[in-house]
Image: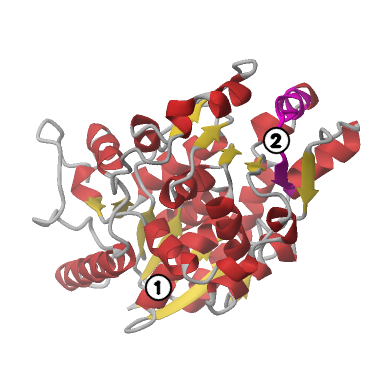
């Protein structure tokens, strides 16, 4: 089986790493990096940390508006797929790289056939239509031949949208990645963390939080607490702070972005974590560290229901209030294994093998023309009230 995997941002590198290791045992993989995250701290360092081969192809798209970035990815990705002739295309998460790869896969015909499309981390929903990521993940799910869901909640979302015939619950590959990293991360703890035990770890990068000076200034004000804050500064956030002159409070230690192992070490040693990152929310849960989400919603509702995550939105003083809540900060409370057992990558490879076999069988039935949608198999679930999506 020949699989072309498309990634572009560091959370996708983390998700892809365990699948790449499992996939390359028996199959061929072409790893394509769109270049959405392109500096060393946001890109190359992650491949080194994760101990996976560097990308076979780097499209070097770089930054830009959503439209410009996605269009350039479409233009550069299409000839790569035509040249490599994969059996299928594998995408992750909800970035512009995900959207571009899904669109190319859905439209492109190579030698009379269309490669299948599979989407890892399918079915997540914030129900916030203003989030670009929400649009990207919905489009990818509805174009995919196979939606690989991390949780039962995600499966329910796919069922409600009539996609259950193409969905499979495999667990979350971030559990696989986190278990692997936790055994290797301790030596990577940054010096600033060693010098300031009991710190609050903060990450802030989403456009709605950092592109608007008034909102970013409000978050900086929220960080002025009676506790040391360690703040790995995302390039996007740094740019806005530099342009507007918004300073970090005196209790905040700003550090450069860190690699994956250093980030896992920072998370595991933190008193608490405050973030607008979906991946960091989940890593906080896996590390057993209370998390405060600097957004109005979260896709990872299980962490909130379990009492390990609090979404504070625009609540004035919400950060300080969460840190002062003894019950919320209690680390002895239950932490159910909502995200699986750390064997999601193996299940994903098995699901891709089955998908590939169905497509090959369909091609034999229909000749060399375009493959029709594969019929559902007993392992896939469908909501009884929904008609088959394809």
Q: Is residue 336 left or right of residue 232?
A: left
- CB of mark 1 within 8 Å of CB of mark 2? no
Residue at 34% over, 38% down? 333
Mark 2, Cα crowd under 10 Å, few <14 / some 14-19 / many 20+, is some
Residue 374 placement: quadrant? bottom left
Disc 1 marks which residue? 3
Considering the numbered disc 1 on the image, is that residue within a helix, a strand or a loop? strand
Q: Is residue 94 above or below residue 317?
A: below
Give the x, y percent position of residue 52.
52, 77
Quadrant for the N terminus, please.
bottom left
Residue at 66% over, 39% down? 204
Query: Does residue 150 belong to the magenta stretch?
Result: no
Considering the numbered disc 2 on the image, is that residue within a helix, a strand or a loop? loop
Disc 2 marks which residue? 227
Give the x, y percent position of residue 128.
48, 26
Front position in the image: 214 or 230: 230
Residue at 33% over, 66% down? 345
- Is residue 277 visible in the rendered structure shown here? yes
């Amino acid at each position: 089986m020949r699989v072309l995997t498309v990634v572009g941002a560091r959370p996708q590198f983390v998700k892809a790493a365990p699948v790449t290791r499992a996939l390359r045992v028996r199959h061929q993989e072409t790893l394509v990096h769109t270049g959405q995250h392109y500096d060393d701290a946001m890109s190359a360092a992650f491949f080194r940390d994760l101990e996976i081969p560097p990308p076979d192809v780097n499209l070097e798209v770089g930054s830009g508006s959503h439209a410009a970035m996605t269009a350039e990815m479409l233009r550069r990705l299409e000839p790569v797929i035509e040249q490599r002739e994969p059996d299928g295309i594998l995408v992750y998460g909800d970035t512009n790289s995900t959207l571009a790869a899904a669109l190319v896969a859905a439209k492109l015909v190579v030698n009379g056939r269309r490669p299948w499309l599979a989407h890892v981390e399918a079915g997540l929903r914030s129900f916030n239509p203003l989030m670009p990521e929400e649009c990207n993940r919905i489009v990818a799910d509805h174009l995919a031949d196979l939606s690989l869901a991390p949780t039962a909640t995600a499966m329910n979302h796919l069922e409600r949208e009539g996609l259950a015939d193409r969905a499979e619950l495999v667990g979350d590959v971030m559990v696989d990645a986190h278990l692997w990293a936790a055994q290797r991360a301790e030596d990577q703890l940054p010096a600033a963390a060693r010098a300031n035990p009991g710190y609050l770890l903060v990450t802030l990068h989403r456009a709605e939080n950092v592109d608007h000076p008034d909102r970013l200034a409000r978050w900086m004000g929220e960080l002025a607490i009676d506790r040391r804050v360690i703040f790995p500064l995302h390039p996007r956030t740094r740019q806005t702070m530099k342009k507007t002159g918004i300073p970090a409070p005196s209790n905040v230690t700003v550090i450069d972005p860190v690699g994956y192992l250093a980030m896992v070490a920072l998370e595991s040693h933190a008193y608490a974590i405050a973030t607008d990152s979906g991946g960091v929310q989940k890593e906080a849960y896996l590390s057993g560290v209370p998390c405060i989400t600097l957004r109005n919603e979260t896709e990872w509702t299980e962490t909130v229901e379990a009492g390990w995550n609090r979404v504070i939105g625009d609540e004035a003083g919400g950060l300080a209030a969460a840190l002062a809540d003894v019950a919320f900060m209690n680390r002895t409370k239950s932490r159910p294994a909502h995200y699986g057992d750390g064997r999601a990558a193996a299940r994903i490879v098995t699901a891709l093998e089955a998908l590939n076999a169905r497509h090959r069988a369909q091609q034999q039935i229909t000749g060399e023309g375009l493959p029709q949608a594969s019929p559902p198999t007993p392992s896939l679930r469908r909501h009884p009230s929904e008609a088959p999506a394809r």
